Amino acid sequence: MTTAPGGVPHPPSSSSHPLRTIRDIRESLPEDQRRHFDAELADTEIEALPRMLHRWVALSNDGFEEFLLSRPFGGLEFGARSYDEQTDAE
């Protein structure tokens, strides 16, 4: 453990994590999310900063976008309803 300037101990930073700075976190986000990140960063109190940054690291590193892009949607037409193609059975 290392000690912060205020005397509060904190665990040593892991060099294995690719996002080590606020700039790294920001650059890992899509442009539209960067505006939200910047706004939240500007309004976050110093004491809550580690929690806020940890949440954004998790969001930027969750792999959800890669998951969506790796799975083809097999001819689905977004906005179409499954019952649009059914014949009127009544």
Image (cartoon, rainbow, N blue to C red):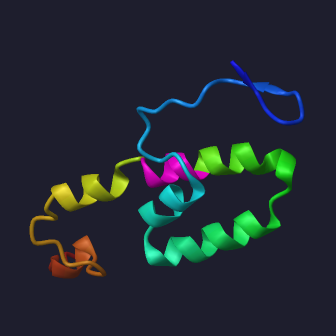
**Of helix, strand and loop, which mostly describes the magenta segment?**
helix
Which residue occupies 72% across, 64% down?
Answer: 41
**Quadrant assignment for the C terminus:** bottom left
Residue occupying the far left of the picture: 74
List x then y, in percent, for residue 45: 86, 56
Q: Quadrant of residue 42?
A: bottom right
Residue 66 vertical placement versus 50 (above, below)? below
Residue 57 on image: x %, y %: 53, 48
Residue range in magenta is 56-61
Residue appearing at x 81%, y 47% in the figure: 48
Question: Residue 79, position in %: x, y?
Answer: 31, 81
Relative to 8, is 67 above or below?
Answer: below
Q: Quadrant of the N terminus?
A: top right
54 in relation to 31, above or below: above
Q: Residue at x 46, y 54 (%)?
A: 60
Instruction: State how many labels appear.
Output: 0
Whether residue 57 appears in magenta in the rendering, the answer is: yes
Camera-nearest residue between 44 and 15: 15
Q: Is residue 60 magenta?
A: yes
Q: Residue furthest right?
A: 6
Residue 53: percent from the left, percent from the top? 64, 50
Residue at x-position 41% and y-position 47%: 62
List the single residue furthest toward the front.
5
Q: In front here: 74 or 46?
A: 46
- Asked whether 18 or 88 is in front, the reply is 18
